Image: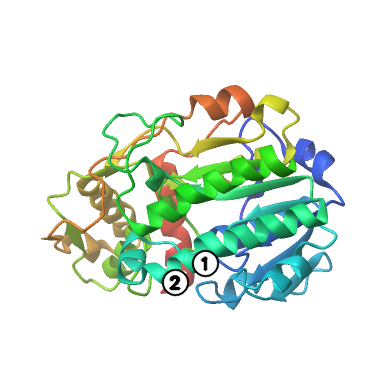
Amino acid sequence: MTHKQSEVTGSYNNNEFQGKLSNKTVLVTGGAGFIGSNLCETLLSLQVKVVCLDNFATGKRENLSAIKDHPNFTLIEGDIRNLEDCHKAVAGADFVLHQAALGSVPRSINDPITSNDVNISGFLNMLVATRDAGVKRFVYAASSSTYGDSEALPKVEDKIGKPLSPYAITKYVNELYADIFHTTYGVDTIGLRYFNVFGRKQDPHGAYAAVIPKFVIQFMNHESPVINGDGTYSRDFTYIDNVIQMNLLALTTENKDALNQVYNTAVGDRTNLKELTQLLKKYLSEYDPKIADVEVKHGPNRAGDIPHSLASVDKAKRLMGYDPQYKIEAGLKEAVEWYWDNLR
């Protein structure tokens, strides 16, 4: 592994995770995606057998280049919308990390049917396959979009608002299905509400690229990034290693009270878009001083966007021992270094 894995696990250490997971088999759906491929790499470093299910609709083969020949890694090309593919992938798995989804609020607004098919029908297929295979635990990617129009800050897991996009509806339905599969079929689930995850391998290209990689590549090309709105909208930007820690905790927790819950997966701090672009310019200018002079422009607010997002991570700390190690500055420094080294 080129990335230093020692910092991933926070107050835990790799030996503790490895002791609980070594020689287990974990299915990672969407394993060729940004978050999924990082999870695959980390699990392999912990001597876990990893099965990756991906149809490469948004995942990338290059994300798997470092691990594709690993003896403990198996790639299954398939689609979660196909129940047969789900059954094939989950066979023999001890745990499922369900990351496969069509992200992006704008994408769901432009094409709500496909987002629904993947994020709801595909999710249900995976739950059915998990139930049928008798898998011990199903950990899934939920979303901060579930908070919808709730203006309360910080966001607390049991207080949500009305969804503001088709994407948000799909992710909330995931939580409802997970709860029903526990109460009806006894499947243990944990949902992780991701808050604006960023870091290595996040795709800067395409119409639905996330703001951080998109702005990074624009700055590197001396192009002006465009902030939606006046730049005061804020987010709880969460570095990938904090997300990896939460997934590992969700896989290994022995606290019965921690199961069949949803958790904010974030830092508990927020940064507005003006501050974000200033930090990106600062860190990128260390590699290319001309970036300091690149102008930042402003456009209209984006449909379906909430003004502010800030998570409480108290529940994750209390029930699972979550200890996020990366604030925005440290995460951005590592992300910028990765993009500079890999995308110039």
- Helix, strand or loop at mark 2: helix
Q: What amino acid is labelled 2 in the image?
A: Thr
Q: Is residue 1 visible?
A: no
**Where does residue 81 sit, x and y in percent of width and height?**
60, 71
Task: Give residue 343's position: percent from left, percent from top.
Answer: 44, 72
The residue drawn where x is 41% and y is 70% is 113
Q: Secondary structure at mark 1?
A: helix
For the residues bearing labels 2 and 1, Cβ distance under 8 angstroms: yes
Residue 330 image offset from top left, x and y in percent: 44, 43
Most foreground residue, 61 or 131: 131
Q: Taking 1 as reference, is 7 above or below it?
A: above
Residue extending farthest to the top is 318
Splitting the image into 4 quarters, where does residue 32 fall?
bottom right
- Identify the residue under disc 2: 114
Q: Which mark is residue 118?
A: 1
The three-letter amino acid code for the residue at tag 1 is: Val
Q: Give the answer, above or below, for where 11 lies relative to 332.
A: above
Name the one closer to the observer, 35 or 328: 35
The C terminus is located in which quarter? Answer: bottom left
Q: Which mark is residue 20?
A: none
Label 2 environment density (alpha carbons within 10 Å; few <14, some 14–19, many ≥20): some
- Is 11 above or below relative to 281? above
Q: Is residue 50 left or right of residue 284?
A: right
Report the residue at 12% width, 60% height from top: 300
Count of residue discs: 2
Q: Residue 307 location, x and y as percent? A: 22, 43
To which quarter of the image does residue 195 belong? Answer: top left
- Taking the spot 39% from the left edge, 30% from the top edge, the residue there is 159
Q: CA distance from mark 2 to mark 1?
A: 6 Å
Q: Residue at x 62, y 56 (%)?
A: 98
Q: Quadrant of the N terminus?
A: bottom right
Q: Is residue 108 above or below residue 275?
A: below
